[in-house]
Amino acid sequence: MLTNRQKKLVVNAFKVHDTDTGSTSVQVAILSKQITELTGHLKKNPKDNHSRRGLLQMVGKRRRLLGYLSKTNPKAYNSVSKKLDL
């Protein structure tokens, strides 16, 4: 789980305008950070199937958001994918 401070740092790095907290690029960045943390947890706890299901849901949601972003704003898609190494 991300702390508020970590989430604010991610939002500041990917926001489109000053009050942006929910744009597609911000959502993708937050999900990527959560996926990274949950992957580390699952490496330590390989039998935690409940968290594994949550991870798979997050990966699917990020994939759908990236598909939407690539259709609506290809420039933003390219910049987000480069920043996140996707």
Image (cartoon, rainbow, N blue to C red):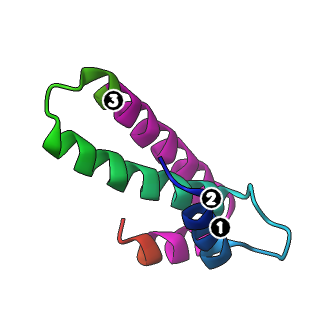
Per the model, the C-alpha gap separating discs 2 and 1 is 6 Å
The residue drawn where x is 66% and y is 56% is: 24
Q: What secondary structure prevails in the magenta region? A: helix
Q: Is residue 19 above or below residue 67?
A: below
Q: Which residue is tagged 2?
A: 4
Residue drawn at (75%, 74%), measured in percent from left and top?
A: 16
Q: Indicate whether residue 58 is drawn in magenta.
A: yes
Give the residue at x 43% y 31%: 57
Q: Mark 3 is on which residue type?
A: Ser
Residue 24 higher or lower than 56, as above or below: below
Q: Amino acid at mark 1?
A: Lys
Pointer 3: what residue?
A: 51
C-beta proximity under 8 Å, tags 2 and 1: yes
Q: Amino acid at mark 2?
A: Asn
Q: Along the horizontal axis of the image, is 10 left or right of 48?
A: right
The magenta stretch spans which residues?
53-81
How far from the left and from the top, in percent, is residue 13? 61, 77
Residue denoted by label 1: 8
Which x, y percent locates residue 2? 51, 53
CA distance for labels 3 and 2: 21 Å
Q: Residue furthest right?
A: 19
Element type where label 2 sits in the image:
helix
Is 36 situated above or below 19? above
Mark 1 → mark 3, Cα distance in angstroms? 24 Å
